[in-house]
Image (cartoon, coloured by chain):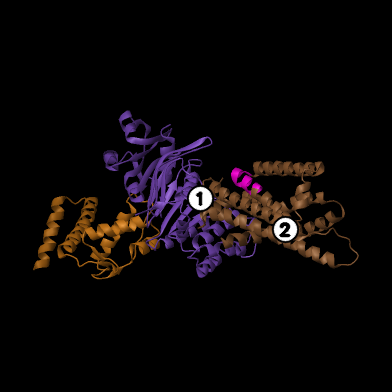
Chain colours: A orange, B brown, C purple
């Protein structure tokens, strides 16, 4: 599991850890049932305080991404399909943003863009 | 408690060895001159014990020792036990010296009998009881040293005057009797014990700077 | 559970006093004790260790009164100086100290002795300040203590060992029963590893919070001086103004400043920022 933290970012460290673990679950790098290091070991490895890793794990557990059992450790939970889909849709929307920005730069209007989108969409179906 | 006593030995080993040499020679000299040389002997005898306290103050050792898993009363007990053992050691050493010197022919020596030794030991123990209590009562190096010195000096002067005036003749006469010296020993030991208890009490409530 | 608890502790010393201190050091975490020089950190630590006695209030270690000597079996301590006979060597120190601890671990001792690169037979008086600190640490850790209390352990250390020490502390924290409480006036030591912060100033506790809360709620706001009106000023815990603009410490929701997004810079506050502004207030 790779986690890269920025200590200068305004985003709190526990938030960064959370987001990156989530990301790895979405992309399939972490799969259901996979064991994660204990929060104390993670804290040591990332050189963050125990409370930071604890908070990240607890939040992820609450949100259903991780399950932990006393004495056994923390594992990746089985993911709900709609979570995955939601995330993939969000990724697509990010691509849209990029697309629109590029279109604007080239001077295409909303109508131009929609027209092209329709052509591509239909061409694909036929 | 034993590690603490061992520490005291470790600390004062060098001092004890060098000073033992001085004692023995001073003691020997005292035979040929005058018994008031005991004064010198007693001063020298006290040096190692005081140097222990000086080292303690210099290094703020008690801060460290109190932070270790040792009761405060044990810290005091260990110091008393060390002082006691040291006194016994010295008396035994002097006895051996007497035996050795006595065995050399042609040397005239004042005869020292067992009960004199016991009285000497008792006097040393009683002195220690007073001085150690002063130490734990004050716990500031300079003030302790000053008060101890004044006390010691006063006692010596009183002793010398009393001897000169003949007020202590009865004591010297009686000190040749074993039953008397035994009583003195018991009293001195009791004083030493009480002093230790009082010091333990004082030290357990004290703050260490 | 709390490893250390101070309840309403007061202490009067020459020209200086600690007023109504209540501190909790939770088990299993690193608590940083910060404050400017002379704010009462050492005195507090000496009181916890029963070297000094409080005038009022109570101090508990592992839920027992701190005067019980046996509690110290579970404590490793490092003071601002090594209070030891300068003629002693580590060898002699070990002969004296090792038998006192039930949990003394020779293997651990040798491991740290080697790691810290300390001479076994050299007199302490020939040690540098950093070596003395390492020596304190060696004896503080060799009996596997549950609770480690340290007074300015990083003072006098070179940056490399300082970092190694921080790493070492984190390694120790993998054991979930372990608690660390340490004072420092160099707050960067704590930025990454502390779980809780206790901040003392002029003998009083100014702040006691988890590091997560601090990172979430304390921000530094920087902006142009003309933006700074009385309303805005009242939001801040402290403001520092220069000809180039203002820098201020905000406790609370930084989204208040989202509408000025283009005119101000919002940053996470470091412990040093918090200490600076809380000590100085506004100028």
Q: Give the range drawn in magenta.
A: B130-140
**Residues tagged by mark 1 and mark 2 found on one chain of the structure:** no
Q: Using a 10 Å C-alpha cutoff, classify the residue at mark 2 as few (fewer than 14 neighbours), some (14 to 19) or many (20 or more).
A: some
Q: Main secondary structure of the magenta part?
A: helix
Of residue C201 and residue B120, the one placed in the foreground of this image is B120
Indicate whether residue A29 is drawn in magenta.
no
**Given this view, does label 1 or label 2 mark the residue nearer the observer?**
2
Chain name for mark 2:
B
Q: Is there any visible trace of residue C118 in the rendered image? A: no
Chain name for mark 1:
C
> In this view, which residue lies farthest toward the top?
C230
> In this view, which residue lies farthest toward the right?
B106
Image vertical order of residue B17 relative to residue C266, above or below = below
Which quadrant: the N terminus of chain C? bottom left
| Residue A116 placement, left or right of B131 | left
Which quadrant: the C terminus of chain C? top left
Residue B67: x and y in percent read 51, 54
Residue at the disc numbered 2: B178
Residue C169: x and y in percent read 45, 59
The residues tagged by marks 1 and 2 sit, at their Cα atoms, a distance apart of 61 Å
Q: Residue at x 14, y 59 (%)?
A: A117
Image vertical order of residue A23 relative to residue C253, above or below = below
Residue C152 is labelled as: 1
């Amino acid at each position: 599991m790779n986690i890269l933290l920025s200590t200068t970012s305004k985003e709190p460290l526990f938030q960064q850890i959370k987001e990156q673990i989530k990301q790895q679950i979405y992309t399939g790098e972490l799969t259901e049932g996979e064991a994660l290091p204990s929060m104390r070991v993670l804290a040591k490895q990332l050189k963050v305080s125990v409370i930071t890793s604890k908070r990240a794990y607890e939040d992820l557990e609450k949100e259903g991404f991780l399950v932990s059992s006393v004495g056994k450790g923390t594992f990746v939970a089985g993911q709900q399909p709609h979570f995955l889909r939601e995330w993939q849709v969000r990724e697509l929307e990010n691509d849209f943003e990029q697309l629109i920005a590029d279109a604007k730069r080239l001077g295409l209007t909303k109508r131009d863009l929609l027209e092209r989108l329709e052509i591509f969409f239909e061409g694909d179906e036929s | 408690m034993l590690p603490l006593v061992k520490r005291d030995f470790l600390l004062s080993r060098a001092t004890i060895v060098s000073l033992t040499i001085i004692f023995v020679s001073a003691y020997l000299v005292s035979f040929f001159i005058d018994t008031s040389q005991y004064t010198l002997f007693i001063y020298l005898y006290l040096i190692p014990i005081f140097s222990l306290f000086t080292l303690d103050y210099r290094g703020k050792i008690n801060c460290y020792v109190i932070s270790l898993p040792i009761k405060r009363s044990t810290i005091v007990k260990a110091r008393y036990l060390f002082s006691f053992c040291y006194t016994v050691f010295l008396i035994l050493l002097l006895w051996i010296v007497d035996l050795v010197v006595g065995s050399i022919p042609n040397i005239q020596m004042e005869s020292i009998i067992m009960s004199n030794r016991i009285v000497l030991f008792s006097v040393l123990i009683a002195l220690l009881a007073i001085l150690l209590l002063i130490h734990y009562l004050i716990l500031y190096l300079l003030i302790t040293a000053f008060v101890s010195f004044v006390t010691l000096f006063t006692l010596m002067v009183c002793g010398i005057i009393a001897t000169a005036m003949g007020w202590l003749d009865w004591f010297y006469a009686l000190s040749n009797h074993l039953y008397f010296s035994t009583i003195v020993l018991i009293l001195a030991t009791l004083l030493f014990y009480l002093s230790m208890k009082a010091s333990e009490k004082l030290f357990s409530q004290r703050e260490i700077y | 559970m709390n490893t250390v608890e101070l309840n309403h502790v007061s202490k009067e010393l020459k020209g200086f006093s600690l007023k109504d201190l209540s501190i909790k050091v939770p088990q299993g975490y690193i608590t940083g004790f910060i404050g400017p020089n002379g704010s009462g950190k050492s005195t507090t630590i000496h009181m916890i260790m029963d070297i000094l006695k409080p005038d009022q209030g109570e101090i508990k270690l592992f839920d027992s009164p701190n005067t019980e000597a046996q509690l110290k079996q579970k404590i490793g301590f490092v003071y601002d100086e090594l209070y030891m006979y300068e003629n002693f060597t580590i060898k002699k120190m070990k002969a004296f100290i090792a038998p006192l601890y039930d949990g003394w671990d020779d293997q651990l001792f040798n491991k740290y002795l080697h790691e810290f690169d300390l001479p076994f037979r050299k007199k302490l008086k020939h040690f540098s300040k950093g070596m003395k600190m390492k020596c304190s640490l060696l004896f503080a850790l060799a009996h596997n203590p549950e609770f480690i209390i340290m007074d300015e352990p990083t003072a006098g250390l070179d940056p490399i060992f300082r970092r190694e020490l921080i790493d070492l502390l984190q390694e120790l924290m993998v054991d979930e029963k372990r608690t660390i409480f340490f004072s420092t006036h160099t707050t960067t030591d704590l930025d990454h590893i502390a779980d809780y912060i206790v901040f003392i100033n002029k003998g009083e506790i100014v702040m006691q919070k988890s590091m997560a809360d601090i990172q979430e709620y304390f921000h530094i706001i920087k902006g142009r001086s003309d933006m700074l009106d009385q309303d805005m000023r009242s939001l801040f815990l402290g403001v520092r103004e220069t000809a180039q603009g203002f820098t201020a410490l905000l406790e609370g929701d930084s989204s208040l400043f989202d509408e000025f997004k283009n005119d101000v810079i919002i940053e996470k506050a470091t412990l040093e920022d918090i200490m600076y502004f809380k000590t100085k207030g506004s100028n």
